[in-house]
């Protein structure tokens, strides 16, 4: 054992893992094969097919808790690579992966917890990344508030069937919803089609709204917003971004607020 109480960061694509790792003392950074994060050199990589040896290695390194940070898609499993111990988990792994995203993530958490590891959320190790209620930039109008309420209702409905965590609403109309391709694809679609869909060209420009799915385990897969989201929202002709306070990661707050101010967009962490 090299120490006690160490935290492992299971890092996926994007810049979140580097931010989380920087907030921890002596983190062990582990990356699933094929999902390298940005701005971070991992301590090790691992394959799902050899999950049990990986979990044993974490224990040997004094790891007692794990935080998942970054985007990871479901891997294609190679039966030839399974070790005997992990092979016994195949029914559990396949059952989880056949469900929706939430089911898959809950299955992964259960396996980590069964090995004696505590799974914690990003908000527990880097609470500044999850803003409470408030307007961080710009001005929110009554039209924006109505559009946000409509978008929140839509996102709740989407999440209930495990589809997505975001929607764009303008003038009470849904211009697009987030699905498997993600937020970038949604905003790109709105940029190409939104102007023609708005009934009043001089009316409210609309907003992107993001929130966790109903009943989602907030330790994994929190929706995220960052400077690039602001730039894309501006290109889509939107007035701003709103999200469920306490349930969305705000990456690089200073840069995101600066981008919103530059583009003339509002940022609203919307309370219940």
Image (cartoon, rainbow, N blue to C red):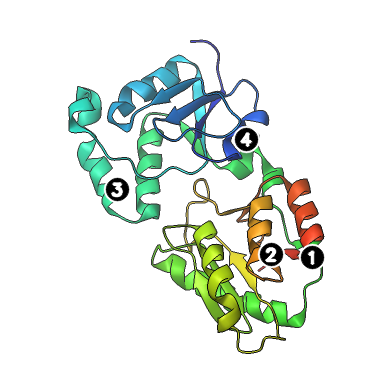
Say which label, 3 or 4, has the lower sequence index: 4
Q: Is residue 242 at all visible to an observer of this figure?
A: no
Instruction: Estimate the x, y position of residue 109 in percent, counting from the top left.
Output: 41, 41
| Label 2, residues with CA under 10 Å away: few <14, some 14-19, many ≥20 | many
Q: Position of residue 149 (x, y in %)?
A: 62, 77
Q: Earlier in the sequence, mark 2 or mark 3?
A: 3
**Marks 2, 4: nearer the viewer:** 2
| Residue at mark 4 | 20
Look at 69% across and 64% down and name the residue there. Answer: 234
Task: Identify residue for label 2.
Answer: 234
Label 1, label 4: how far apart the Cα atoms are: 29 Å
Q: Alpha-carbon distance for marks 1 and 3?
A: 42 Å
Residue 85, image x, y percentages = 23, 25
Q: Can residue 32 be spotted in the picture?
A: yes
- Real-space Cα separation, disc 2 to disc 1, in angstroms: 8 Å
Q: Earlier in the sequence, mark 2 or mark 4?
A: 4
Q: Residues within 10 Å of mark 1 (few under 14, many from 20)?
A: some
């Amino acid at each position: 054992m090299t120490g006690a109480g160490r935290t492992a960061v299971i890092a996926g694509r994007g810049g979140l893992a580097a931010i989380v790792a920087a907030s921890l003392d002596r983190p062990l950074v582990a990356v699933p094969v094929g999902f390298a994060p940005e701005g971070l050199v991992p301590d090790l990589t691992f394959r799902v097919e050899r999950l049990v040896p990986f979990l044993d290695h974490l224990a040997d390194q004094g790891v007692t808790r794990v935080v998942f940070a970054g985007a990871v898609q479901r891997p294609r499993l190679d039966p030839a690579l399974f070790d005997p111990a992990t092979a016994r988990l195949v029914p559990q792994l396949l059952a989880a992966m056949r469900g929706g995203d939430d089911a898959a993530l809950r299955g992964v958490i259960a396996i980590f917890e069964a090995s004696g590891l505590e799974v914690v959320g990003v908000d527990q190790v880097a609470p500044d990344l999850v803003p409470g209620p408030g307007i961080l930039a710009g001005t929110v109008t009554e039209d924006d508030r109505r559009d946000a309420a409509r978008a929140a209702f839509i996102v709740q409905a989407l999440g209930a069937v495990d589809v997505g965590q975001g929607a764009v609403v303008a003038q009470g109309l849904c211009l697009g919803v987030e699905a498997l391709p993600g937020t970038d694809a949604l905003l790109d679609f709105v940029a190409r089609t939104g102007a023609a869909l708005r009934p009043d060209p001089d009316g409210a420009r609309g907003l992107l709204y993001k929130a966790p799915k109903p009943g989602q385990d907030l330790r994994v897969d929190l929706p995220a917003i960052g400077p690039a989201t602001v730039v894309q929202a501006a290109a889509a002709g939107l007035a701003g971004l709103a999200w469920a306070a306490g349930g969305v990661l705000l990456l690089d707050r200073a840069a995101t607020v600066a981008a919103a101010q530059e583009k003339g967009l509002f940022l609203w962490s919307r309370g219940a």
